[in-house]
Image (spheres, helix red, strand yellow):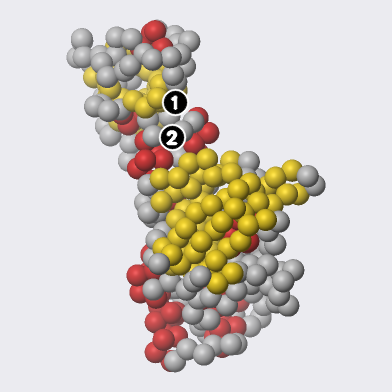
């Protein structure tokens, strides 16, 4: 049985659609990530799902019952759905344990489990004005989870975090699903947050879901350049430039755009193993190098785990098996 059913959701603002005919289902423990540029409708959609924003048309069913919007209920929201905003607030000069004690109906053992999952057990005696932004966010999250929701909506949860607190929060979100049995859906624009976590990725643009699929499908087989760019670096060879790549084994010249992720190109100094090119630029990213190679006048980006070339070197570029996609 589906935990959530979203049917024909549309919403307009000043005559323009900010959501248009959104339809999908979510099963219990299925992890859906919603990706899209700023203004694509991601946040509005999850607020409608949580009963915090009114839809113009369509409906949301949670556990087969309609989620009422704020115009239909006295207090907006749904008791079974928790929503963590980017703009959460905590009262100043309160101890963490005081904030969490309000409306806490969990047993002492259940509360201790929740605090451990949220990585806040060591913060309970501190006051809120002594906490970092990442710590405050996890307190706000624990406060939501005290009510034992079955669905948690996370709206850009990583956007204001440094790498240390981001990695802590990623572990927290994994444990919320695995240890607390709460289904999670998150909104993000960063592929590093989405791809390792999600079972399915929904890509939004101009209020519509333009692509749905597994992280592997959406990353490797985007429907257009917008989706390609959203999920990582890429090479795009237009039909006008395709002739220059006709000698590259594995590439089909078919009148469509040729899409190739940088990791699907390989470079070598061995003559004859691919198209001849010249190294134009090298960037270091810690775990890999990004090498820009000029194939004639056409630049391509190649990811390499090691780098034994320098700017100006002659190299040969080849394509990994099934490394090209077309749209």
- Whether 63 is drawn above or below 256: the answer is below
- Whether 12 is drawn above or below 227: the answer is below
Q: Quadrant of the C terminus?
A: top left
Tell me the residue at 63%/46% (across/down). Answer: 20
Q: Which residue is mark 1?
A: 327
Q: Which residue is mark 2?
A: 222
Report x, y in % for residue 29.
Answer: 39, 65
Q: CA distance from mark 2 to mark 1?
A: 8 Å
Rendering quarter of residue 83: bottom right
Tell me the residue at 54%/45% (across/down). Answer: 209
Tell me the residue at 53%/64% (across/down). Answer: 153
Which residue is nearer to you in this view: 172 or 69?
69
Lower position in the chain sequence, tag 2 or tag 1: 2
Which residue is nearer to you in this view: 195 or 272?
195
- Whether 325 is drawn above or below 216: the answer is above
- Asked which secondary structure carries label 1, the reply is loop
Report x, y in % for residue 226.
Answer: 53, 33
Residue 29: assigned label:
none
Q: Residues within 10 Å of mark 2 (few under 14, many from 20)?
A: many
Report x, y in % for residue 190.
Answer: 49, 46
Asked whether, in this view, residue 68 is left or right of residue 296, the answer is: right
Is label 2 in contact with label 1 (beta carbons under 8 Å)?
yes
Tell me the residue at 70%/62% (across/down). Answer: 54
Q: Quadrant of the N terminus?
A: bottom left
Rendering quarter of residue 205: top right
């Amino acid at each position: 049985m589906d935990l959530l059913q979203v049917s024909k959701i549309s919403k307009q603002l000043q005559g323009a659609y900010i959501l248009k005919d959104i339809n999908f289902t979510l099963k219990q423990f299925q992890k859906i990530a919603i990706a899209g540029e700023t203004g694509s409708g991601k946040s509005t959609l999850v607020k409608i799902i949580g009963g915090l924003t009114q839809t113009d048309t369509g409906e949301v069913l949670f556990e087969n019952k309609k989620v009422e919007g704020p115009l239909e209920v006295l207090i907006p929201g749904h008791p079974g759905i928790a929503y963590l905003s980017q703009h959460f607030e905590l009262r100043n000069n309160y101890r963490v344990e005081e904030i969490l004690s309000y409306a806490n109906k969990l047993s002492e053992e259940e509360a201790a489990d929740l605090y451990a999952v949220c990585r806040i057990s060591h913060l309970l005696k501190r006051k809120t004005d002594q906490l970092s932004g990442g710590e405050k966010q996890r307190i706000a999250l624990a406060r939501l989870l005290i009510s034992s929701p079955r669905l948690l909506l996370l709206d850009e949860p990583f956007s204001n975090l440094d790498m240390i607190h981001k990695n802590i929060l990623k572990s927290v979100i994994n444990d919320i699903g695995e240890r607390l049995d709460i289904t999670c859906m998150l909104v993000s624009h960063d592929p590093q947050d989405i791809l390792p976590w999600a079972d399915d990725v929904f890509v939004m643009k101009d209020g519509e879901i333009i692509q749905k699929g597994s992280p592997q499908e959406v990353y490797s087989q985007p429907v257009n350049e917008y989706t390609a760019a959203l999920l990582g670096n890429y090479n795009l060879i237009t039909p006008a430039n395709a002739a220059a790549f006709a000698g590259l084994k594995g590439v089909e010249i078919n009148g469509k755009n040729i899409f190739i992720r940088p990791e699907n190109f390989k470079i070598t100094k061995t003559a004859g193993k691919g198209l001849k090119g010249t190294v134009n630029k090298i960037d270091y990213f810690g775990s890999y190098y990004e090498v820009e190679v000029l194939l004639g006048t056409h630049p391509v980006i190649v990811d390499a785990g090691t780098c034994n070339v320098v700017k100006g070197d002659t190299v040969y570029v080849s394509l990994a098996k099934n490394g090209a996609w077309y749209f």
